[in-house]
């Protein structure tokens, strides 16, 4: 009878241990899923606020006027446009490639 109780107790402990390990692994997976979902939610929340800000900008009459004037190159009365020429790139001075050392020595001793 005592042997049966020990075997039953050991089997019960093994069952609880396997159940605990399974639950811990499931908890880890669910926690990773929660973190991914939370990050995705925060990203979409930020994007939503950016889109709402952009929408309010596009809705503003002054911004609409500015956009139209810039795209069509229009001016208001008594307004002056200043057109600046693009700066030209600075020319680079080309330096001649020096002669190899052996040729310089040859010229020193035998050219004159």
Image (cartoon, rainbow, N blue to C red):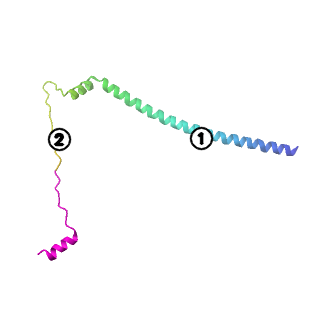
Residue identifier under label 1: 28
Cα separation between marks 1 and 2 = 59 Å
Residues under numbered marks 1 and 2 in contact, where contact means CB atoms less than 8 Å apart = no
Residue identifier under label 2: 86
Q: Badge 1, how many Cα within 10 Å: few under 14, some, many 20+?
A: few
With 52 as the anchor, is 87 left or right in this view? left
Q: Residue at x 17, y 53 (%)?
A: 92
Q: Residue at x 62, y 38 (%)?
A: 26
Residue 49 position, x and y percent, is 40, 30
With 69 as the anchor, is 35 left or right in this view? right
**Which is more N-terminal, label 2 or label 1?**
1
SS type, badge 1: helix
Magenta region: 91-112
The C terminus, quarter of image: bottom left
Q: Residue at x 79, y 43 (%)?
A: 9
With 102 as the anchor, is 15 left or right in this view? right
Residue situated furthest bottom in the rendering: 109
In terms of depth relative to the viewer, which is nearer, 50 or 14?
14
With 90 as the anchor, is 13 left or right in this view? right
Q: Does 108 lie within the magenta span?
A: yes
Vertical placement of residue 38 versus 17, above or below: above
Vertical placement of residue 82 versus 13, above or below: above
> How many numbered discs?
2
């Amino acid at each position: 009878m005592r042997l049966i109780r020990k075997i039953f107790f050991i089997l019960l402990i093994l069952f609880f241990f396997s159940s605990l390990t399974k639950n811990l692994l499931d908890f880890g997976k669910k926690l990773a899923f929660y973190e991914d979902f939370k990050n995705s939610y925060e990203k979409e929340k930020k994007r939503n606020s950016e889109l709402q800000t952009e929408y309010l900008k596009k809705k503003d009459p002054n911004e609409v006027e500015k956009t139209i004037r810039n795209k069509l190159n229009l001016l208001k009365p008594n307004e002056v446009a200043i057109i600046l020429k693009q700066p030209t790139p600075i020319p680079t001075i080309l330096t001649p490639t020096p002669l190899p050392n052996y040729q310089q020595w040859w010229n020193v001793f035998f050219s004159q």
